[in-house]
Each structure stands twice: as structure tokens, then as C-alpha cells.
Amino acid sequence: MLRLDGIVRKAVIPAAGFGTRMWPLTGGAPKEMLPVDGKPMIHHIVQEAIDAAIEHIGIVIRAGKESIARYFERSQPDCEITFVHQPEPRGLGDALLCARPFVGDECFAMLIPTSFSAASALQSRS
């Protein structure tokens, strides 16, 4: 049964796609790792989640996206991060289905790693 207590404690960040539209910028590296103000894009979206009191983040990745996991192993954010593996990128819906064991019966936020607030990226300068 879905738990609806009004508090969102978990977030899912789908990051398993190929990023073909950004290929000229990434050169094949994960688009989520492109730097914005000196930090990877995915860092900024994780920070937005932390600022919104999210306690546990599930990042959906696939083979070839291990650099995302390595980044967060080194940076140690102020929340718990779980990596969910998507065997092959088959779209956003499939990524969320892969995250279902992580989410369980809780409400959750879905955060797109390449769509974040410019204000949050620039706050690191102050």
C-alpha cells in the first residue's frame, strides 16, 4: 500500500540514457558529468534535492556511467545515495520501473539531472 504521509524523503534521478543530443559537447562521456560552474551537472541536482530535505537519492545508471558513482564516492554528499542499475536504457518509464525496489511504497520526487535551477548552480560562488 502506498504511504501518503505528505513527506517526500526519496528522490530518483534517471541518468542511464545515451545523451546522443549532447554528443558534440560530451564526446561520449556521461552528459550528467558536464561541468557547470566547476561541478558536474548531476552534483547541482543532488544539491537541490538535499536543500529540499530529501534524505535518500536513487540514481539510475547503466554500464558506462560508472564515473557518476565514482564522483559521489569521492564527494560524499549530505544524504544517502543508492545506485540502481538499468540493464539497458529503454526510456524514462523503464528507468523508474528499475527504481521501484528503491522507492518501495513511498512517495518520491523525480529529478532530471540536466534540468536544474541556474540559481542553485551559482550559489556555490557565494
Image (cartoon, rainbow, N blue to C red):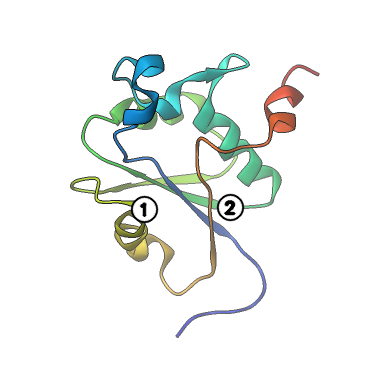
| Label ID, residue 114 | none
Give the class, few, some or many, for how many residues have Cα within 10 Å of label 1's Cα (few <14, many ≥20). Answer: some
Q: Amino acid at mark 1?
A: Leu
Asked which secondary structure carries label 2, the reply is: loop
Where 30 sits versus 94, above or below?
Answer: above
In this picture, residue 83 sits left or right of residue 4: left
Mark closest to the chain's N terminus, 1 or 2: 2
In this picture, residue 112 sits left or right of residue 67: right
Q: Which residue is mark 2?
A: 55
Q: How many marks?
A: 2
- In the rendered image, which quarter contains the C terminus? top right
Inter-mark Cα distance, 1 to 2: 22 Å
Which residue does the image show at 29% across and 29% down from the upper left? 66
The location of residue 82, given as percent across then percent down, is 40, 47
Where 30 sits versus 103, above or below?
Answer: above
- In the rendered image, which quarter contains the N terminus? bottom left
Which residue does the image show at 67% across and 26% down from the upper left? 121
The location of residue 54, given as percent across then percent down, is 61, 52
In this picture, residue 123 sits left or right of residue 116: right
The location of residue 115, given as percent across then percent down, is 56, 38
Q: Amino acid at mark 2?
A: Glu
Asked which secondary structure carries label 1, the reply is: helix
| Label ID, residue 92 | 1
Give the class, few, some or many, for how many residues have Cα within 10 Å of label 2's Cα (few <14, many ≥20). Answer: some
The location of residue 114, given as percent across then percent down, is 51, 35
